[in-house]
Image (cartoon, rainbow, N blue to C red):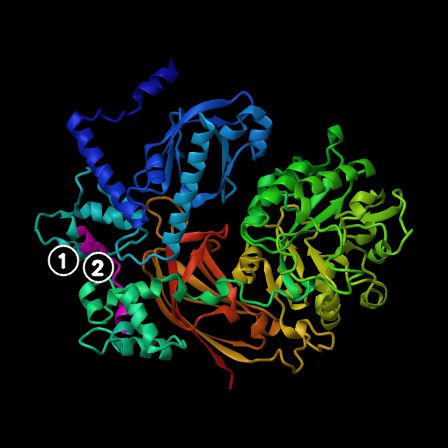
Amino acid sequence: VSARITMSCIKREPELSRSQELLQHVRSQKVTQVNASLLGMEGDQDLQFLLQGGDLLKVRSQSWKKTRYFKLQDDCKTMWRESKRTFRKKQTFLLDDISVVRHGRQSEGLKKNTEENVEGRCFSIMFKSQRKTLDLIASSEEEAKQWVSSLQKVMFNIISFSFDRQDKRPPSWIYSCLRKADKNDDDKLSESEVKRFLRLINIEVDDDYAEMLFKKCDKSNTGLLSGEEIEHFYDLLTHREEIDVIYGAYAKTTGYMSPQNLLDFLMKEQREEVTLADAHNIIRKFEPDEGAKGKQLLSKDGFLMYLHNADTMVLNPKHKEVYQDMSQPLNHYFISSSHNTYLMEDQLKGPSSTEAYVRALLKGCRCVELDCWDGSDDEPVIYHGHTLTSKILFRDAIQAIKEYAFKTSDYPVILSLENHCSVEQQTVMAHHMNSILGSALITSPLGEGMPSNFPSPEELKGKFLIKGKRLNKLEASFVQDTAAAEDTDVTEEEESNDEDEEQQKKSKLKMAKDLSDMVIYCKSVHFHGFEDARKNLGFYEMSSFKEHKAMGLAEESANAYILHNVEKLSRIYPAGSRADSSNYNPVPLWNAGCQIVALNFQTSCSEMDVNQGRFLVNGKSGYVLKPAYMRDLSSEFDPITLTRGDWLKPKTLHVMVISGQQLPKVNKKKSSIVDPLVKVEIYGVQADVAEKETNAIENNGFNPEWNENFQFDVYVPDLALLRFVVKDYDSTSGNEFIGQYTLPLTSLQMGYRHVPLLNKNGDLIPSAGLFVHVMVLDAE
C-alpha cells in the first residue's frame, strides 16, 4: 500500500496538447539540422538512421534479455535509451564516451549469454571509461551492420569536428545548455534564464555584469533575448581580450591582417619557416568573410579560427605522423608496454576481459601481457594467479589481439607470456597462436642463417613476436640433430606479491617444444649482472626487472644499464605489492634506455598521462626512437651525473599561461563552479625535473585568465616531457584533477598556441583547452 501511495504522489509531467507537440517537433528538427550541419552530416543517411532509432535486445545474462528502444538525440552526440526503471537517471550516453563498436559475438557477455546462431545480429558498444560494455542484438544481420557502421561514422565526424573546429558558431554542447536554461521552451532567454545558462556552462559572474551583458544584447527592449540577440550574447561572453591584443599588434592594413602582416606574425611570434605564399593560403582557408577574403585580408575571426586549427596547436603536426627512422634494430626504440593487460581494475579481485586488450591496443600499446594457467576442458585461461580475478580463455584473448593489434599502429606487437601451464596446455596455446595469428606470427628469424641483431619495426610491420621461455639457445635451431627434449625443466619466476625476492615462488616447469620454438627474438632469461649478460647472453635473450630492482640499477649503474640496452631488450614491471594496479614513474627507466617499461593501462594516473605523452608522437605508432647517444656502445651518457657530451643541449623554456576555455566541471552539481589553476611540469633527467603553478581563478571555468610567466632550465631536451595540468583549487582538501596534456619537449611548437586537454582516461575533452605562449631558446 505504501508503495502505491508513494508512486501516486510522484509529480507527473502534464500531457502536451497537439499544438505543443507540433511546436516541439519543429524546434527539435531545427536543432537537429543545426547540429547535423556542424558535423558536416546534413541529410546523411547514417545520421538519419540513428536519429530515427529502433528496438534492440539488451543482453545482461542468459536469463536477462530485454527489448529497449535506442535513438540519437537532436544534439547529434547523445544516445538515449529507454529504461523501465522509474527512478533511472542515466538513460543517455555520449558518443564521445564510446571506445569502439564491435560487430558479432565479440564480448565476454555475448559469448557466454547468446547462441552461435545469432552471431551476425550481435554487436557490442565498449566505453572509454570503466562503464560496462553494452551488449545488443538487432532483429537482423543487416540491421546490426547498419547500427555499427552508422555509429562509427558519426563518432568519426565528432572526433574530426572536435580536433579541427573552424566554425565560429557555439559548439553543440552550448546549444544544449541554452535549451536547458530555456525553462519555458519559448526559444527566448529571460535575465534569470541567462544566469541559469551561465551556471550550466561553468561560469559565475557578478549580477551587475550579467545584467550589463543582458541589456547590451536586448536590442528589442523586451526583457528577453532571442535569435541573433542570443548569438550576440554568446559572442560577448566568449570575447577574448588576449586575441584582440595579439591581432591588433599585427593588423596594420585598415584594421585587418594583410598576407605580409600575417607572415610577420608567423615568423616573429610563431618562429615558423614560412613564405608569403603560405600566408595567402592561410587566408584562403580560414577567412570566413568573403569580402575580406576577396581582398586577401585576414579578419580577427579568421585569425582565431586559424589559431584553433589542429595543425597550429602546441604539438608539431609533423610529429603526428611517423617521422622517425623505423629501420633501426627493435631494441633502439622505447616501446609502449602494458602490464597485466587482461585486467580491467585491480589485481586481487578485478574482472579480466578481452576488452582490456582491445583498449590497450587502441591506445597504441605494442607489448601486452598474457598470464597463462591451466583451464578446464583442456583450454588455457588468463587471469592473475592465486587471486579472485575472473578468468578469460587464452584463445579469446588471442582472437581479440589479432583483430585490434594493428588498428592504431602497423608496427609489431610483442606477446609477453607469463607461462604457468602444463605441457599439454602449452601445446594448446601454441596451436591457438598458430591457427589464429597465422603468417603474422614470427616463428623463425628473418633472412638466412643465424641473425646477429634485431630486425627493425619496419621489417616487422603487421607481425607478432612471442616473449617467453625457450628450451635452448636460438643458435641451436641452426645446428642439425640438436633438439631439446620436451620435458626439459626451465625455471619460471612468478611475479609474486612478496617483495622479498628470496621468498618468491619458483617452480620447475616442463616446456612444450611447440611453444618454445615460437620464441625467436624475445627469450626470457634471469639477470645475473651486466657483465654476465655481455659475455654469456645472445642479443635476443632479455630479462624482466621488478620496478625496485630496475630503479636501483637506473640510479646506481645508469651508464651500464644504457649500454646493456644498446645490445638487448629490458622489460620493467610494477611490484606485486601494487594490489590496486597503481603505477610507478616510467621516466627514470626510459632515461636508462629501458625499452619495455610496462604500466597498468587500466589505471588512470599521472604516470599513464606521461606514458601517453611519450608515445603521443611518431604517428602514435607505439615506437619512439631513442636518442643516438643511447644507441651507441661507446656512449658515456649518464642521466644522473650528466658529464659533458652530445646529450647536453642546455635550453631555457619560457611558458606564459594566458587563459583557459570551457573547462569542464569537476562536481556535476548545478551550483558547482571550478576555481582553476594550472601546473606546468617538466619530466626528464633528474636535473630537469621541475614544476610551477599559477594562482587559482575563482569561480570561472568558462574563460579564466592567468597571464603568468614561468621559466625552466632544461639540460637534456631529447628526454624531456612538458605537462600542463589543470586542477580545481580546494583550500580544505586536495585540488581535483580537471584535465591535462603531455608532450615531448622536442615536439613543441613555439609562439601562441592552444593546448587541448585530455580527461583522466586520456580522451579529448571537447572544446576545452588552454592558451599559452611558449618559447625554447638556447641557454646563455
The residue shown at (67%, 37%) is 395
Disc 2 packing (10 Å; few <14; some 14–19; many ≥20): few
**Closer-to-camera residue (17/261):** 261
Which residue matches tag 2?
236
Q: Position of residue 641 (x, y in %)?
A: 68, 77
Does the magenta-highlighted stretch encompass residue 240? yes
Res. 33 in view = yes
Which residue matches tag 1?
216
| Magenta: main secondary structure | helix
Res. 345 in view = no
Is 248 drawn above or below residue 240 in the view shown?
below
Give the magenta-colored segment's residue range. Answer: 230-245
Does the magenta-highlighted stretch encompass residue 51? no
**In terms of secondary structure, where does tag 1 sit?**
helix
In this view, the residue farthest toward the bottom is: 780
Q: Position of residue 175 (x, y in %)?
A: 27, 46
Task: Please state if 339 lies on the left or on the right of 139 as rendered.
Answer: right
In this view, the residue farthest toward the top is: 1
Q: Quadrant of the N terminus?
A: top left
Disc 1 packing (10 Å; few <14; some 14–19; many ≥20): some
The residue shown at (80%, 53%) is 501
* Amino acid type shown at disc 1: Lys
* Amino acid type shown at disc 2: Leu
